[in-house]
Image (cartoon, grey):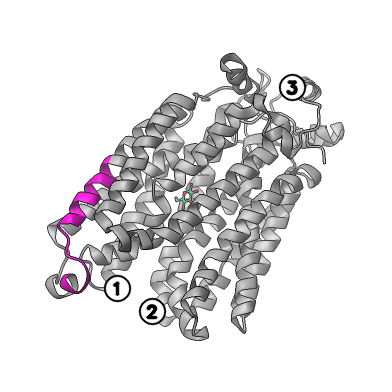
Amino acid sequence: MSTVISTPGALSPSSTGRLTPWLGVVLVVVLTAGALFGYDQGVISGALPGIKETFSLSLLMVQVVTSWVTLGALLGSLVAGELGDRMGRKRTVLVAAASFTLGAVVQYLAVDTAMLVAGRLIVGAGVGMAAVAAPIYAAELAPASLRGRFVSGYQLAITIGIFLAYLVNGQLSAKGDWRLMLGAAAVPGLALFVVGLLAPESPRWLMLEKRRADAATELRKVEPDVAVDERLTTIEQSLAADAHAATWGELFAKQWRRPLLVALGLAVFQQVTGINAIIYYANQIFAAAGFNTEAARASVTLWAIGGINVAATFIAIAFIDRIGRRKLLLVGLVGMGLSLAVVGVAFRFIATGAAASAAAAAPSTAGIVTVGALVVFITCFAFSLGPVVWTVINEVFPAPLRSRGVALATAVNWGSAWLVSQFFLSLVTAIGSSLTFGLLALLCVVGWLWIYRVVPETKGLTLEKVQELWSSKS
Ligand code: BGC
C-alpha cells in the first residue's frame, strides 16, 4: 500500500514551541507508552521464579516465556508502520494499548503455559506497536524546538517503567506473586487507552487524508499561537513534494541508503554495547560481585541501575536540543566503553562460583568497583545512546518513508536486544565475565568510530532540513 506521511517539525516562524495543555496530553500519551515498554523490560526477571514453580517449566519453556515478548514486539513494530499510515498515529497507539491490556489480563489469568505464552505474545505486540507509534507521534506533534525533549521524554518514561518494575519485583518476588506482577501492566495499558482517546491526531496525517478542517482543529489545540493556514499550507507543500508512494522496496532504494544506515546502525549499537545484558542480568552480575543476600542485590539493582537510569536521562532532556545529538552520543560511548573495561578488569579479581560464595561475606573491593563502574555505564547510556538513538531514528527518514523506516529500525533494535539477552549468559560461561565485558567495551569503540564517521548532527533542524543532509553528502 502506498505510504505518504506529512513532514513534522516544519514550524512556521510564529510558533513559540510552548508546552500547551494539549501538547501536555500528547506528552502523557508518549510517557505512558514508554513506561509500558520499560515495565515489560524490567519485570520478567522478578516474575520468572514464581512462573517456573507454578508451571514446572523446562529450560526451553523458560526461554520461550521470557523471549516471546520480544518476538511479539518485533512483529508488532513491523505492522505498526503500516497501521500508522492507514489508521493514523493516534489510533495505532489505541490498538497498542488495547493489545497491551489484553495481554496483561491473559497472563494474569493463565491456566497453563500455552495461555501464558499467548499472553506474552499479545503484550509483546502491544509493546512493539507502541514503541513505533509513540515516538513518531511525539516527533510529529512536537514543535522542532521541543522535538528532542519530547522523544527523550519517551526514553525517560522507559527508564521509569524499568524502575517501577524493579520496585514491584522487590515487593512481590519473595511471595512469588507473578500473576500480579504481570497483570499489573493492565493498569497503565488501560490508562494509555483512555488518554489516547482524548489525545489529538497528528495534523500532518490528517492533511495527508485531505481532512484540512480537522487538521486545523488539531493544530490549533497543540499550538494555539501558530498561524494555522500558513502552517497547513507548508505541510501541504511538503506533502506535495513527497507525494509519491513509498513501498518497503523504496526504503531500501539507493538514495535512502544513508538515513537507513544511520537508523539501523544506531538501533544495533544501542543494544550490542550491552545495556540489556545489564538491565536483565544485573542481579546475577551483582551476585558474582559478592552481593550475597537477595535484599542487598535487590536494592543495589533498584538504585544503582534503575534509579541512576532515570536520573541520568534528565541530563539528556536538558541538553539534547542544546549540545546536540552527536556530542552526547560520542561522550556517552567513551564513558560506556571505559566503564565496561573497568568491569572487565574488576572481574579478573572476583572469585566466581563456589569459591565466591564461600569466600565473601560482603562485596570485595573489586565488587564495589564493579558497582561503581556499572553506575558510570548506566549514567552514560542514559544521557546518550538511550534517548538519542530513539530521537535520531525518528528524525532521519524523509516523510514518505518515516513510518516504515522507524518500524524497521525498531524491529532491528528488538532483534539485537533479543540476541544480546539470549547469548550474554552463554558468553559468560564460554569465555568468562572479564572477556565478555572486554568484548562489550570493544563494541563501544567500534560504535564510537562508526558514529563519528556516519551520524550527522540533527539538532534544531526542521525535518525537511534533515533531508538536505543526505543530498549534500551522498
Ligand atoms: C532501550 C531499551 C533499554 C532501555 C534502558 C532503551 O532506549 O531501547 O532496550 O532497556 O533503553 O533504559
Nearer mark to the viewer, of 3 and 1: 1
Instruction: Using the image, tell me which numbered label, if any, was put on residue 174.
Output: 2
Image coords of residue 368 (percent x, y):
18, 56
Considering the numbered disc 3 on the image, is that residue within a helix, a strand or a loop? loop
User: Label for residue 5?
Assistant: none
- Let me know if residue 199 is in the magenta part: no
Residue found farthest to the top: 472
Quarter residue 116 falls in: bottom right
Local SS, label 1: helix
Quarter-of-image position of residue 97: bottom right
Image quarter hosting the N terminus:
top right
Residue 353 colored in magenta in the image: yes
Which disc is residue 227 wearing?
A: 3
Instruction: Indicate which disc, 2 or 1, sits on the residue closer to the N terminus.
Output: 2
Q: Is residue 162 above or below residue 471?
A: below
State the image coordinates of residue 266 (x, y, percent, origin top left): 50, 38
